[in-house]
Amino acid sequence: MKQTKRKNSSGNSVLAVLVLLLFAPLWLPLLVLWSVFYLGSFVCLHLAVWILWLPRSKRLLFVYSDSPVWHDYYEEHITPRIQKQAVILNWSRRKKWSFRQFIAASVFRLFGGGREFNPLAVVFRPFRLGKVFRFFQPFRDLKRGRPEELARMELDFFNYLSAQGTKPSPGSASEY
């Protein structure tokens, strides 16, 4: 009986490969087109950030929300340290984002993905790819009584900012 199941599963695998190969002329051009579009978006957004944000000393995109889990923490500990060099988006107010925030919203969508995207920081350096810091899981750990991961993530985040020659300091935010 076990041999019959093995034959069926290997037969199903062969059939799946054959179907994939048979329909390759349909899905392969779509995959190539999607890859070109994604790569083009990635490059264009990096160029936009390098040209429009970096000369104004805006080196990071920071996204958070009004969640009771992290809102007050960010308002007290993080935002004052980064606001001079950050474009800040509040996810809870995303319906009010205007065309003025188009680049920031596009960067967020590109780097944020579909899961664990809030809170999020993306740090940009000239002619380098953006570095993403996802704070969702560290806050989940903090809520469960494990603050170490959040402390490590914050340390990594601020060390990365300092390493590129920017010192987090208070100032006026660009909150949308």
Image: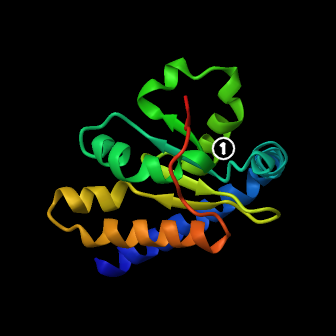
Q: Indicate the quadrant containing the N terminus: top left, top right, bottom left or bottom right.
A: bottom left
Q: Is residue 31 visible?
A: no
Residue furthest toward the bottom?
3
- Residue at image coords 30%, 48%: 73
Q: Looking at this view, is 76 or 3 the one in front? A: 76
In this picture, residue 35 sits left or right of residue 79: right
Percent x, y for residue 6? Answer: 41, 77
- Name the residue rendered at 30%, 46% in the picture: 70
Q: Residue at x 63, y 20 (%)?
A: 98
Mark 1 = which residue? 107
> How many other residues sit within 10 Å of disc 1, few (<14), some (14-19) or many (≥20)?
many
Residue 136 appears at what percent x and percent y?
37, 54
Give the side of residue 107 with respect to residue 75, left or right. Answer: right
Q: Amino acid at mark 1?
A: Val
Residue 10 percent coordinates (x, y): 50, 73
Indicate whether 33 appears above or below 1. Answer: above
State the quadrant of the C terminus.
Answer: top right
Label 1: element kind: helix
**Most extreme residue toward the left, as rendered?**
145
Q: Position of residue 81 (x, y in %)?
A: 47, 54
Q: Which residue is located at x 68 percent, y 48 percent?
A: 58
State whether residue 89 is above or below residue 43. Answer: above
Q: Considering only vertical position in the picture, is 118 above or below 105?
A: below
Q: In the shown orientation, is residue 126 left or right of residue 141? A: right
